[in-house]
Amino acid sequence: MSKEPLDFSASCPIPIQRHLRVLLAHGGGGRLMRQLIEQVFAPAFRSGPAEPLHDGVVLEFAGPSSRLAFTTDSYVVKPLFFPGGDIGQLAVFGTVNDLAMCGARPLWLSAGFILEEGLPMETLWRVAQSMRAAGQAASVRIVTGDTKVVDRGKGDGLYINTAGIGVAAEGARIGPLEVRAGDAILLNGDIGRHGMAVLAARDEIHLESHIESDCAPLADAVLRLLEERIEVHCLRDCTRGGLATALVEIANDCGLRMDIEESAVPVEEETRGICELLGFDPLYVANEGRFVAFVAAQDAERALGILRAHAQGAGACRIGAVATEGSGMVILKSRIGAGRILEMLSGEQLPRIC
Amino acid sequence: MKFIDEYRDADAARRYVQAIAKLVTREWTLMEVCGGQTHAIVRYGIDELLPKPIALIHGPGCPVCVTPVELIDKAVAIASRPGVIFASYGDMLRVPGSQRDLLSAKASGADVRIVYSPLDAVKIAEESPDTEVVFFAVGFETTAPANALAVLQAQRRGLRNFSTLVAHVLLPPALEALLQSPRRTVQGFLAAGHVCTVMGYNEYHSIARRYGVPIVVTGFEPVDILQGVYMCVKQLEEGRAEVENQYARSVRPEGNRPAQEAMRRVFRVTDRRWRGIGKIPRSGLALAEEFAFFDAETRFDVAGVEAEESAECISGLILQGIKKPHECPAFGARCTPETPLGATMVSGEGACAAYYRYRPRPVRR
């Protein structure tokens, strides 16, 4: 499951040499802020010829659909760079994926930055370049933004908020209430890598790991399903709370029972190893490039074929089905054959004592 | 994954279930001692696979659950002092004290940090010489050696800003207390594999003999547990009461000698209160005289802190295997992981947490 590397290393060196770190004045609305926008953000995000900076942007679109999808998300991650991704890439792909889960083609993003005074300018530059590359990979444009700077010690270096607008695919009705008894439940690959990659990258835990985040844009794979007229009833990306939480939320909303085969859910060896070690359940670990699709049973095999031919679905598999009876719950059939109810977690998973 | 998959194999599990069914002629009540085993049993539905006459009851082996409420209060009191970094294993943070838990102390400004090893706390102490760093030394014999090493390392490095709040408990005295109880129902034990990895199982022979109970040292995967049940039931059916080792891939009769040595150097045996159960003689560890300098209770003068447990919480009965989580009127209603009355509802190894997570409602198929 190779991902196109986001290569910005060979491109432009950081242009701002005078200030090696972010100063409070970079958010002050004056000359320094303008410099920051003109020298860091505008070159990274601009797609056409330079235009005067303005308070907002006017966008035009043409197409058969008159329905827009609109979403927003804020990104907070420690460390800012981790194996397989970084906060900038997350901020683009995360919002793109939320639009994709509405069955929409993502078009435009806004980017709001909250910077901590003292953040190395080079870090901000790398993040902006990563967002640029991620935007290109996901075919979205970052068209407007904002910057604020907070006192040193009041932020973890850098927070990003992105909002996104996309055009919903014509005719597609996608959401928990569209789920039908008998639907096949598909997953586009192995789970648990993002959460474990970020955890392993933190200083406090001394683990040597080769796990890379699965961070990836999902819109193209989803749109491929819709273009091929797969009857997609519901989509959900398995981010915070993992696969289990995504399924439980949908089951609660649609009021139907879902039967999931634990042995059908792929988890890579190394991810499993770290989860076993810390007492984490991979079903609840965050992903950034995984989604579940509820599709009509007769379309399931074809949908799997389409996903498997796509870079973001090489490991796609059928993990279960929506039952014809029973109400609003998810039953996980364990490897040894007994069933248990999946619930949402209370708070985060905490590493166990022994 | 090696050492995992073969012990979660559906065919192997089925074979043991069938073998147990063939063996059993009457009702037997077994206790799995360790909370890790309880979670595997509930998670994989092992108790539902077993033939009816065999009842599994859940034992006291959850270190978080048995840590007495006043120790949580002491931890919160110490953590709330300015200039203190309080380092703890993750699953202690949500355990309710009489007023608050460590997570809410953290939200109120206390510097509470999750560490994955006690040596990380020593490292923090080394890096912040002007701050008091306190490690919450919780656990059974499993974690005690690493915590002992942390104290030895702090001593060797001359760290005057490191101390430890010791809440260690020992399993064999708790098993004896259960066996002496007039409400005793348990007829055989699945002993905790990880505790025995450290301590060995030589000290269990006299317990098996004196109380006439079979004790099978058992691992944590479904097939381990089913094999442990099989061995235990076989003994019961044959009228034997011996110590056997199912978990031989990890446990030696004598245990891990260097680990025991470190424990013996740093700690001394003491009486300890168990949450929900009460005081059990010689069932805990405290710092030995030579290491009294590292005792956080003395350093922060919290030895006098006392606290009452919630009267509504029946975790004491649950930890003794007298009741099951479902039988508590507060379960899932007044008591949930968000608003726990007792530690068994929040600990990663707590029986109530296992039931709430894996069996919140009966499954109708």
Image (cartoon, coloured by chain):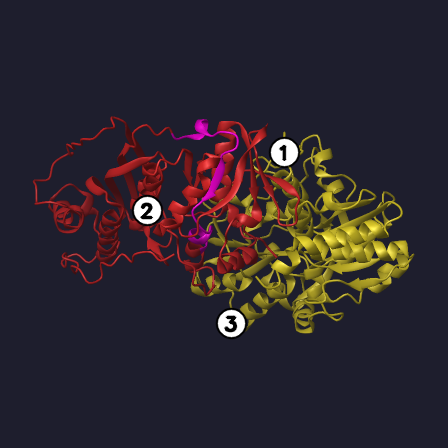
Chain colours: A red, B yellow
What is the number of the mark on residue B335?
1
Residue B283 placement, left or right of B143 = right
In this rendering, does residue B131 appear at all?
yes
Residue A36: x percent and y percent? 15, 49
In this rendering, does residue B281 appear at all?
no
Residue B2: x percent and y percent? 59, 64
Q: Quadrant of residue B226?
A: bottom right
Please, which chain is the residue tagged with disc 1 on? B
Q: Residues within 10 Å of mark 3 (few under 14, many from 20)?
A: few
Q: Residue furthest right?
A: B239
Please, which chain is the residue tagged with disc 3 on? B
**In the figure, A102 relative to A315: above or below?**
above
Look at mark 2 in the image and give the residue it sits on: A217
Residue B135 part of the magenta segment = no
Q: Are marks 1 and 3 on the same chain?
A: yes
Q: Are marks 1 and 2 on the same chain?
A: no
